[in-house]
Structures are given as C-alpha cells and as structure tokens.
C-alpha cells in the first residue's frame, strides 16, 4: 500500500510569498468549488473574516474535504505556497476528487517552485520513486538540494545518500559527508551514525577516531544500540593507540 502524504494545518507554516511567476495559477478544477467560494466566510472572535487558508483548515478538521480543498485552492491561487501543497496532498491522498491529478501535481510543483521546502522534498521523492511522475534521479537531486539548502533535514539525508550511491550524479563521498554532517548537526540519529562511520573508516573525510567517537556517542544518546557498541569499540581503539 502506498504511503500517504502529510497534510500541513499549521498556520505558522504559511508562506505568503507569491508562487513562482513562471507557472500560471492552476485552474480551480471543478464547478463544485463555486459553492464554497460563494458561501459566507466565517469570522473570528473579533468579527474579521477568516482567510481562505484558515477556513480550509476548519473545514478539513470538520471532515469536509471537498470544501477544504476548494478553499485551499483559492488560497493557493492567491499565492499561498502551503495551501498549494495542502491542496495537492488532499488530492494525491484521494481524500477529495478535486482537482484532477495533473492539476494537483501542478499545485505541488508551484509550491516547490515558490521555495516551500516540504513540497520540494515531496516532489523529489516522487521523482526518485517514479511515482505519479517520470522517474528521474537528476530531478530528485535538484529538489532535494533546494530543500536541503533550506535546512530540511530529511532532504539533507536523501541528498547525501544520492551522492554516496552515485544516483543522479557522480559518486562523491566528500559531498555525501558534507550533507550527512549537516543532518547530523541537526540531530538526525541515522546521519550521526553514518558520519561516525565515515570518520572511522576515512570515507569522504580524513580518518578521525575522536570525531567518530563524538558522533557514535551522539547517536547512542538517542537510543541507537549499535552506535553505543561502536562507541565502546572506538574508545578501546583510542586507548590502545595512546598506549603505544
């Protein structure tokens, strides 16, 4: 069973910048949205009309996926990248029949093009897996990189892995170490273990057992049992080296 995509309903994540100018605003997709647009907008406790994105969140929470979808699409057409992402996710999760799949993918691409890191990561994953879009490791790398440069930790790990395996690019252990390192700095347990291993073996970096120990211990503190065992092993190796 295909994994579901994650909807974002956190107002603080809304990005007000306009969607990429090179992409036209997507079609509304269905006349059924007219009813949602024409309905009286709810107000907040001060009597101010709620923005479409806020109304969409309320509708979605009430189980009215089609109404939420229309409102997310309205907010997306006004330049809300998070709403464009949410509209794509609702359709691709098959929670609404609106809009058609290609329009949903266009919404996702617009959100990614506007710089929304989570949309960039999602689009990268779709290209990497060949799901709903043509498989393309180079496009996966492009979108992972854009998200990684914004500090998106899962994208940093994914980009590092593409470099490590040489998918969509030439194999580059140094670049892999850089991006795994960024993710390790952000607290990713798996990246911390990998960085430790790279320092231990001298892959993409110079051998440095002290740094290997730092990162094995960091992963161990997060509950990685294998990292804890490796940390003990490195401690013994360092002690043996210093006795010589």
Image (cartoon, helix red, strand yellow):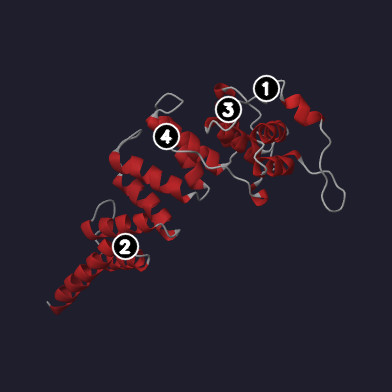
Tell me whether circle 4 and circle 2 mark residues in contact (CB < 8 Å).
no
Tell me whether circle 4 and circle 3 mark residues in contact (CB < 8 Å).
no
Say whether disc 3 or disc 2 marks the residue closer to the N-terminus.
Answer: 3
The disc at residue 104 is 3
Say whether disc 1 or disc 3 marks the residue closer to the N-terminus.
Answer: 1
Q: Report x, y in % for residue 111.
A: 60, 35
Q: Residues within 10 Å of mark 2 (few under 14, many from 20)?
A: some
Q: Secondary structure at mark 4?
A: loop
Q: Report x, y in % for residue 165.
A: 29, 40
Asked whether, in this view, residue 17 is left or right of residue 43, the answer is: left
Disc 2/disc 1 C-alpha distance (Å): 48 Å
The disc at residue 224 is 2
Q: Secondary structure at mark 3?
A: helix
Q: Residue at x 84, y 53 (%)?
A: 45
Q: Which residue is mark 4?
A: 2
Q: Which residue is mark 1?
A: 27
Tell me whether circle 4 and circle 1 mark residues in contact (CB < 8 Å).
no
Give the farthest residue toward the right. 47
Q: Nearer the viewer, mark 4 or mark 3?
A: 4
Q: Secondary structure at mark 1?
A: loop
Q: Residues within 10 Å of mark 3 (few under 14, many from 20)?
A: many
Q: Residue at x 79, y 44 (%)?
A: 50
- Place residue 94 in its image quadrant: top right
Say whether disc 4 or disc 3 marks the residue closer to the N-terminus.
Answer: 4
- Indicate whether 27 appears above or below 162: above
150 or 208: nearer the viewer: 150
Say whether disc 4 or disc 1 marks the residue closer to the N-terminus.
Answer: 4
């Amino acid at each position: 069973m295909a994994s579901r995509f994650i909807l974002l309903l956190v107002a603080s994540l809304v990005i007000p910048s306009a969607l990429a100018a090179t992409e036209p605003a997507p079609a509304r997709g269905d006349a059924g949205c007219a009813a949602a647009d024409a309905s009286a907008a709810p107000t907040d406790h001060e009597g101010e009309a709620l923005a479409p994105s806020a109304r969409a969140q309320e509708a979605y929470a009430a189980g009215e996926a089609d109404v939420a979808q229309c409102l997310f699409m309205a907010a997306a057409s006004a330049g809300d990248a998070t709403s464009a992402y949410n509209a794509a996710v609702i359709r691709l999760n098959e929670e609404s029949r609106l809009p058609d799949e290609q329009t949903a993918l266009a919404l996702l691409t617009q959100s990614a093009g506007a710089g929304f890191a989570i949309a960039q990561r999602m689009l990268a994953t779709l290209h990497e897996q060949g799901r709903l879009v043509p498989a393309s490791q180079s496009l996966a790398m492009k979108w992972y990189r854009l998200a990684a440069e914004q500090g998106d930790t899962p994208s940093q790990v994914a980009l590092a892995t593409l470099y490590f395996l040489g998918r969509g690019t030439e194999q580059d252990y140094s670049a892999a170490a850089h991006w795994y390192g960024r993710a390790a700095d952000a607290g990713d347990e798996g990246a911390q273990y990998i960085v430790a291993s790279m320092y231990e073996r001298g892959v993409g970096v110079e051998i440095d057992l002290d740094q290997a120990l730092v990162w094995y211990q960091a992963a161990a503190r997060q509950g990685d049992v294998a990292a804890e065992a490796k940390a003990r092993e490195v401690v013994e190796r360092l002690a043996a080296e210093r006795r010589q």
